Image: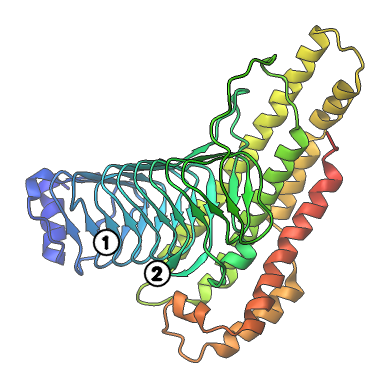
């Protein structure tokens, strides 16, 4: 089908394309996956990818040219401009002008990023808001209860996710999945002109003052953190490729992967019960595909860490460290990768914590008197006891994965 015929077909369906000759539609795009109800595609836009799914009421390119490449857009999503690829955008989420959204991102209901934001392998729970001029890759952020009470990242913030040893085993968890999905946790605030050095874990209610460079976890709830700007001048010996504190990095990665697997279970068992006009079944398919890629990405990055530690052991030998305790521990650590990989593979495809899951789902189904209600309303309709059952189920998954993997990975 020619470009002209594709555009004509979309217009006949009801898609508003003010300047038809300026829009490009890839040959692989299935036009049946683009709704004709209230969709607007402005001039200079490009639509690519066989998976691309655009629901009713979406607005693309209102502020500048936009490219949609293999993405799932729920109803009333706005992509004001920029490039989005291999990601899912749920109802009323928004992407600002000039943003760069790469593979593996999920913006849940009413989450938003302002202009010139770069994200990749990033998951934002409902209502989470990123300001302007931000780089926030390899993160999961939860917290907040509504658009008026949401987690937020201030403008000009950066998540440092690449190390001097050239690895990205640096995912940071702000909040967590077991409590975050209940939409009743205190919001997290990261002040503008600041940053955090991954991997980090921050608890709900954390407030980091503007201009702060955060280097440490904050596991207590509702804490105000400030100071900790750029390091003062110093000069210490640095040996390229030699790792210190590997154990902490691995534990953070295990926690992050465990939370992703918990979220996978939530999508599979809860989201699938919440299909509605604003949440068609195809979106769950997109969520599962994207989350599977996110889990694979984290395991791949963890594998790279193991490989780099192996190189570190060789460097220690070359430096004459001989059979030092550090070298012996690193050797044992590296040799454990095959078991670690198998362990994650088995866990990722296991039906975990069935008793806790069934208890929650029975309660969830019982309270759903109006099954046409949107997902947000259904979650907010849960009482405290029901929410606790859901959190207990998901936390049991996280705990099981952590306990299992701790037995496999040697302490370094």
Displayed quadrant of residue 57: bottom left
Label 2: element kind: loop
Residue 351 visible to an observer of this rendering = no
Give the structural element (helix, strand or loop) at label 1.
Answer: helix
Q: Residue 138, position in %: x, y? A: 53, 43
Between 96 and 106, the one lying in front of the other is 96
Rendered residue at 70%/38% (across/down) = 249
The answer to which of 91 and 171 lies nearer the viewer is 171
Please say if 405 is above or below 234: below
Q: Foreground: 208 or 244? A: 208
Q: CA distance from mark 1 to mark 2?
A: 36 Å
Name the side, left or right, on which 98 lies relative to 21.
right
Asked which quadrant contains residue 314, the reply is: top right
**Where the C terminus falls, by quadrant?**
top right
- Corner quadrant of residue 357: bottom right
Q: Residues within 10 Å of mark 2 (few under 14, many from 20)?
A: few
Tell me which residue sits at (60%, 29%) in the image: 167
Residue 317 is left or right of residue 379, and the answer is: right
- Residue 288 locus on image (x, y percent): 52, 58
Q: Residue at x 68, y 18 (%)?
A: 241
Q: Is residue 210 above or below residue 268?
A: above
Q: Which comes before the other along the chain, label 1 or label 2?
A: 1
Say which residue appears at 46% left-offset and 49% top-offset: 191
Numbered circle sitting on residue 163:
none
Q: Nearer the viewer, residue 220 or 244?
A: 220
Residue behind mark 2: 148
Q: Which residue is mark 1?
A: 32
Image marks 1 and 2: residues in contact by CB distance under 8 Å: no
């Amino acid at each position: 089908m020619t470009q002209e015929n594709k555009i004509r077909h979309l217009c006949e369906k009801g898609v508003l394309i003010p300047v038809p000759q300026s829009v490009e539609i890839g040959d692989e795009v299935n036009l049946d996956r683009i709704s004709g109800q209230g969709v607007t595609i402005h001039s200079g836009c490009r639509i690519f990818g066989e998976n691309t799914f655009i629901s009713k009421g979406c607005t693309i390119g209102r502020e500048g040219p936009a490219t949609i490449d293999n993405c799932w857009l729920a109803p009333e999503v706005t992509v004001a401009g920029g490039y989005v690829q291999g990601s899912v955008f749920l109802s009323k989420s928004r992407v600002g002008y000039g943003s760069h959204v790469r593979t593996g991102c999920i913006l849940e209901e009413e989450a938003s990023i302002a202009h010139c934001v770069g994200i990749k392998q990033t998951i934002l729970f409902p209502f989470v808001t990123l300001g302007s001029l931000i780089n926030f890759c390899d993160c999961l952020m939860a917290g907040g209860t509504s658009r008026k009470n949401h987690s937020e990242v201030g403008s000009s913030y950066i998540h440092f996710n690449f190390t001097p040893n050239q690895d990205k085993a640096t995912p940071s968890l702000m909040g967590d999945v077991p409590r975050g999905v209940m939409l009743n946790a205190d919001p997290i605030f990261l002040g503008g002109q600041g940053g955090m050095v991954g991997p980090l874990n921050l608890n709900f209610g954390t407030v980091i003052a503007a201009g702060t460079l955060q280097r440490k976890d904050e596991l207590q709830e509702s804490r105000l953190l400030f100071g900790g700007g750029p390091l003062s001048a110093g000069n210490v010996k640095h040996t390229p490729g030699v790792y210190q504190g590997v154990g902490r990095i691995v534990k953070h990665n295990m926690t992050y992967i465990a939370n992703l697997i918990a979220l996978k279970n939530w999508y599979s068992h809860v989201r699938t019960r919440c299909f509605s006009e604003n949440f068609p079944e195809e979106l769950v398919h997109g969520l599962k595909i994207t989350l599977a890629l996110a889990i694979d990405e984290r395991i791949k990055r963890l594998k790279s860490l193991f490989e780099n530690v192996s190189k570190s052991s060789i460097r220690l030998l070359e430096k004459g460290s001989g059979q030092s305790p550090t070298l012996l521990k690193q050797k044992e650590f590296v040799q454990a990768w095959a078991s670690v990989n198998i362990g994650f593979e088995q866990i990722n495809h296991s039906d975990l914590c069935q008793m806790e899951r069934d208890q929650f789902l029975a309660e969830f189904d019982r309270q759903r008197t109006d099954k046409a209600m949107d997902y947000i309303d259904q979650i907010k309709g849960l009482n405290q006891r029901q929410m606790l059952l859901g959190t207990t189920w998901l936390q049991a998954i996280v705990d099981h994965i952590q306990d299992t993997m701790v037995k496999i990975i040697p302490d370094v």
